[in-house]
Image: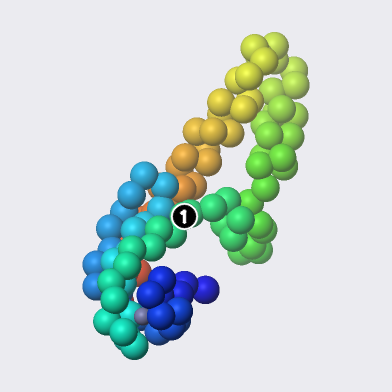
Amino acid sequence: MIKCPRCGDIESKVIDSRSIEDGIRRRRECLSCGGRYTTCERIQSQGIYIIKKDGRREEYNREKLSAGISKACEKRPIPSGTVSKLVDGIEAEIYQIGKSEIARLSAIG
Ligand SMILES: [Zn+2]
């Protein structure tokens, strides 16, 4: 819940929003006292869902992804650290997708 730092009211309108490194920054104006403040909303791996081929949704899980990659590579000798680097790359891509969806939503709203 976002509260106005001046009066504590939760009603506000967004007057500007822009994408930052790992989330979105919004400029808000309090509807009750008119005070302006900035909020940063971060994109987190919680709440990211992977949609499977059969249409089922599954919550993204880093452990599971690493385990899957390790298993796929088990017959091949790969240097340690490769799996976590791969997972980092995949996560970066997931966040990128999340970001563009947020950008699209705020363009509509
Ligand atoms: Zn206020």
Q: Which residue is mark 1?
A: 42
Residues packed near mark 1 inside 10 Å, few (<14), some (14 to 19) or many (20 plus)? few
Determine if residue 52 is in view: no
**What x and y, as percent, mark residue 16?**
24, 67
Tell me, what colour scheme is on the image?
rainbow
**What x and y, as percent, mark residue 42?**
46, 55
Residue in view at x 60 percent, y 20 percent: 82
**What x and y, as percent, mark residue 40?**
40, 58
**Mark 1 within 8 Å of ligand 1, using the beta carbon:** no
> Quadrant of the rendered structure where residue 72 is?
top right
Toward the viewer: 17 or 51?
A: 17
Determine if residue 105 is in view: yes
Question: Residue 97, relative to residue 71: is it above or below?
Answer: below
For this view, does 18 lie left or right of residue 70? left
> Quadrant of the rendered structure where residue 37 is?
bottom left
Query: Quadrant location of ligand 1?
Result: bottom left
Residue in view at x 45 percent, y 75 percent: 3
> Quadrant of the rendered structure where residue 26 is?
bottom left
For this view, does 53 lie left or right of residue 4? right
Q: Quadrant of the C terminus?
A: bottom left
Dot 1 amino acid type: Arg
Residue in view at x 42 percent, y 47 percent: 22
Q: Residue furthest bottom?
A: 32
**What x and y, as percent, mark residue 36?**
28, 72
Q: Secondary structure at mark 1?
A: strand
